[in-house]
């Protein structure tokens, strides 16, 4: 056991751990530094931390300090015992002293309700050393560890929500395709790139034929299923460089770098034609295709040309592709 005179002062050791826990971005590193600093100040031999995952029924041993590989494996098996101090402290939310080990729960309070996060167990050389350990110091260790865990989980939740809102801002919630806002930006960027490089961009507008009648026959849920199926065909028919979006109630938009828009559109029509009937009606789409810079020199004019081509295709029947003149 290390000479007590070589130990860092307990408060200094804990201060170093608190700094790591409050300033660090990685939970494992923060908790590891905090617990390691604390047991160094206490002169303990080892420590273990278990955390309660909100998505799992049982806590998991997530950190050990001062244990070799064999002892770590033994600890994993030991904490499965319902009577192990670490397990009891986390389950019963109370401090447990058993022999050379002191275990404390990790708890935060929200709106007056305690929320258990796990437990920390510190093991000393013997029971006498454990009994002599400063209880206030150990409780402070548990409280700071709980705050570090809670802080990391809140940060993770914020990041997940931010990602969700970002995705929501750019995708159509019904079909999962890009929304009009996103593909409008994609179109602007592709036209700018093509203009610089002297290239072409194809734009296709797809309209589900007689969707109002189909929606009436199949019901709203059936109509939504049709839109999702058409979106799936679109997503599976285009190239990696293409972008597809739901641009309106029953309209979809394709932005395809190059001049292959009509070819891709025809592939989409053929795929949609294979969909099973809904509400006793077959499913088909009609498409209009235009190209930059032949049919327009900006997004507005190219989209207008594609819309005009779509109107011509509609006038000639269902399930057709019409390109600009």
Image (spheres, grey):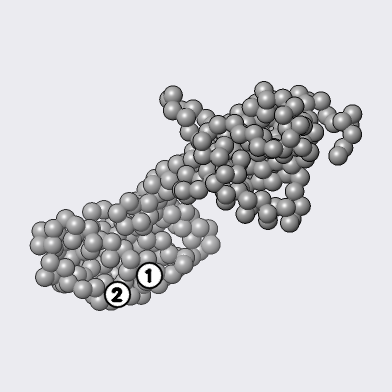
CB within 8 Å, label 2 to label 1: yes
Is 306 placed above or below 21 here? below
- Element type at mark 2: helix
Is 132 placed above or below 269 here? above
Q: Give the residue number, with chain letter if any, for mark 2.
A: 271
| In this rendering, position of residue 8 left or right of residue 238 | right
Which residue appears at 74% of the width and 55% of the height? 69
> In the drawing, what numbered circle is on residue 245?
none
Is 202 placed above or below 186 here? below
Which residue appears at 59% of the width and 31% of the height? 95
Pick the front one: 216 or 151: 151
Query: Percent position (x, y) of residue 13?
Result: 77, 29
Disc 1 crowd, CA 10 A, few/some/many (<14, 14-19, 20+): few
Query: Percent position (x, y) of residue 61?
Result: 61, 48
Q: Give the residue number, with chain letter if any, for mark 1.
A: 236
| In this rendering, position of residue 61 left or right of residue 296 | right
Disc 2 crowd, CA 10 A, few/some/many (<14, 14-19, 20+): some
Query: Percent position (x, y) of residue 181?
Result: 37, 48
């Amino acid at each position: 056991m290390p000479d007590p005179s070589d130990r860092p002062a307990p408060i200094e050791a804990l201060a170093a751990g608190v700094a790591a826990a409050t300033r660090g971005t990685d939970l494992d590193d923060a908790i590891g530094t905090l617990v390691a600093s604390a047991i160094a100040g206490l002169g303990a031999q080892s420590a273990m931390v278990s955390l309660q995952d909100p998505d799992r029924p049982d806590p998991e041993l997530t950190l050990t300090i001062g244990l070799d590989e064999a002892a770590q494996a033994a600890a994993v098996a030991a904490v499965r015992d319902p009577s192990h101090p670490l397990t009891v402290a986390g389950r019963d939310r109370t401090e447990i002293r058993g022999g050379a080990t002191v275990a404390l729960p990790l708890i935060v309070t929200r709106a007056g309700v305690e929320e258990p996060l796990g437990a920390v167990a510190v093991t000393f050389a013997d029971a006498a050393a454990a009994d002599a350990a400063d209880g206030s110091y150990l409780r402070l260790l548990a409280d700071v560890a709980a705050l570090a865990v809670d802080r990391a989980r809140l940060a993770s939740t914020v990041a997940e929500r931010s990602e969700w809102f970002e995705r929501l801002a750019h995708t159509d919630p019904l079909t999962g395709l890009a929304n009009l806002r996103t593909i409008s930006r994609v179109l602007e960027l592709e036209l700018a790139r093509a203009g610089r490089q002297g290239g072409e961009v194809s734009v296709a507008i797809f309209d589900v034929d007689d969707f109002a009648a189909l929606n009436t026959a199949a019901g709203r849920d059936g109509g939504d299923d049709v839109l999702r199926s058409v979106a799936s065909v679109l997503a599976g028919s285009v190239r990696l460089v293409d972008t597809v979006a739901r641009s309106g109630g029953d309209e979809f938009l394709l932005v395809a770098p190059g001049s292959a828009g009509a070819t891709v559109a025809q592939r989409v029509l053929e795929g949609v034609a294979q969909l099973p009937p809904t509400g006793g009606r077959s499913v088909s789409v009609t498409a209009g295709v235009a190209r930059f810079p032949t049919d327009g020199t900006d997004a507005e004019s190219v989209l207008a040309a594609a819309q005009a081509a779509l109107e011509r295709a509609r006038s000639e029947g269902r399930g057709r592709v019409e390109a600009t003149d």
